[in-house]
Image (tube, rainbow, N blue to C red):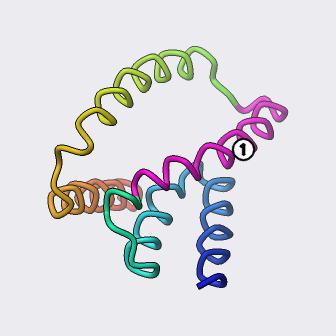
């Protein structure tokens, strides 16, 4: 179990640093399928794990001057509102529906990235 946790964390951190992604795409499936965590707990835990990863990546990206500040500020303002709404309705969504919504978003994102 300890090896699985470290492996999931390592892969997640690597993907977060390289792609700015990893929390949802790696952590949630890893915790659900490899660790047997319940869907809602996996999503909530992923959000908590993403925080320190994101802070570290942000500092490195900031140091390298990789930000487009006008875009960042606009997206953050909408993201804060969306995050609040999403967190408030999170517990009202059954795990089976949450899994389907999450899977659909991952498939759409994957197809858009490839084509």
Which residues are drawn in magenta?
43-66
Q: Position of residue 57 (x, y in %)?
A: 72, 44
Q: Position of residue 36 (x, y in %)?
A: 39, 78
> Residue 68 occupies which quadrant of the picture?
top right
Q: Is residue 47 magenta?
A: yes
Is 39 positioned to the left or the right of 113 in the image? left
Q: Position of residue 40 (x, y in %)?
A: 32, 57
Q: Relative to 90, is 5 above or below?
A: below
The extreme right residue here reads 63
- Spot occupied by residue 16 in the image (x, y as percentages of width and height): 62, 54
Classified by dominant secondary structure, the portion drawn in magenta counts as helix
Mark 1 sits on what residue?
Answer: 57
Q: Is residue 95 left or right of residue 24?
A: left
Question: What's the residue at 49%, 55% (across, down)?
Answer: 46
| The quadrant where residue 72 appears | top right
> Toward the viewer: 26 or 68?
26
């Amino acid at each position: 179990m300890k090896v699985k946790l470290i492996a999931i964390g390592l892969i997640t951190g690597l993907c977060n640093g390289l792609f700015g992604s990893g929390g949802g795409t790696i952590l949630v499936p890893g915790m659900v399928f490899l660790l047997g965590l319940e869907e809602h707990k996996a999503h909530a835990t992923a959000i908590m794990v993403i925080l320190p990863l994101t802070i570290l990546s942000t500092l490195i990206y900031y140091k390298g001057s990789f930000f487009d500040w006008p875009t960042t500020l606009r997206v953050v303002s909408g993201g804060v509102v969306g995050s609040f709404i999403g967190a408030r309705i999170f517990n009202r969504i059954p795990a089976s529906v949450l899994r389907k919504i999450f899977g659909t978003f991952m498939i759409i994102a994957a197809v858009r990235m490839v084509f």
